[in-house]
Image: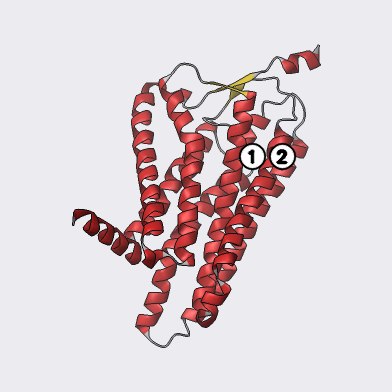
Amino acid sequence: MKRQNHTLVSEFIFQGFSSFCEHQLTLFIMFLALYLLTLVGNIIIVTIISLDRHLHTPMYFFLSMLSASETLYTLVIIPRMLFNLIVLDQSISLAGCATQMFFFVTLAICNCFLLTAMGYDRYVAICNPLRYSIIMNKRVCIQLVWGSCSVGLMIAVTQVSAVFRLPFCAKKVSHFFCDIRPVMKLSCIDITINEILTLIISILVILIPMGLVFISYILIISTILKIASAEGRKKAFATCASHIIVVIVHYGCASIAYLKPKSENTRDQDQLISVTYTVITPLLNPVVYTLRNKEVKEALRRAIGQKLS
């Protein structure tokens, strides 16, 4: 009978922002506005980089790949979240939940390693400028992007397969999308092994890339400090500033979400953290790189000028 009850769970129900029922319309408008800004910003970045020959460099190639990945990442989560805010039916099938989790994990991990690739690109540009074009050739750039996506894909298959092999006895997901831990909590059996697997994967895809970026910037800073002119040091730091900001926020949010001790935060606090890395962080990429990056702003002016003329 117990095994039979496991098969009765054919769908999950998101609890989402049920504790903010009276503010759901406000949340819908706010999240929709942020989502549209994220879409427009990332699409502009990808378009400008593809059209402007001045931006056909490894650094901007990685940026365009990150923007494309962030666009898909938000597409997996936010439209469904917006739909759930305005309709009464907040159910999702097991297959739909597994699909959403698979693409979420794949793209999230891909983003982590793309940021690492961007850090390596900055390291080569500043520490080995004479060999930059040789080391960071087109083939290497494509291999780094392909490697980032492949790692995300393989880990997502492992993680999602482990989660959906579990028997589920409960339907209500204490979240607004199919994240790993909230879904695992619905299992009828002990999930200690799954939690250990999730922790190991989190360490591999957060701490290791973050450590590689950290080492890159130690070497970058030590090289920059050896530059004789103040103007040269300022210019070198400027090329890294945008990436540093995105890295700190991205890895910081991911670390809080997946490396913190379980049950340390309340459900509302967990959801606030999740909103930060699913809604706010993807918006940060286009904002930082368009407002702080001189070359992207100049490319935008050139594009607007050509359009007007």
Pick whichever, 306 or 46, lies toward us.
306
Up/down of 257 relative to 145, above or below? above
- Tell me which residue sits at (32%, 58%) in the image: 291
Q: Quadrant of the N terminus?
A: top right
Q: For residue 167, which quarter of the picture?
A: top right
Task: Tell me the SS state at disc 1.
Answer: loop
Point out residue 146 in the picture as x, y percentages from the top left corner: 61, 55
Tell me if label 1 and label 2 are in contact, CB under 8 Å: yes
Pick whichever, 137 or 68, lies toward us.
137
4 horizontally vs 49: left or right: right
Up/down of 85 relative to 191, above or below? above
Return the residue found at the far front. Answer: 309
Separation of marks 1 and 2 at Cα, in angstroms:
10 Å
- Tell me which residue sits at (57%, 54%) in the image: 112
Identify the amino acid type marked 2: Glu
Task: Tell me the SS state at disc 2.
Answer: helix
138 horizontally vs 10: left or right: left
- Say if residue 260 shows up in the picture: no
> How busy is the neighbourhood of tag 2: few (under 14 within 10 Å), some, or many (20 plus)?
some
Up/down of 102 relative to 281, above or below? above
- Say if residue 223 shows up in the picture: yes
Return the residue found at the far left. Answer: 309
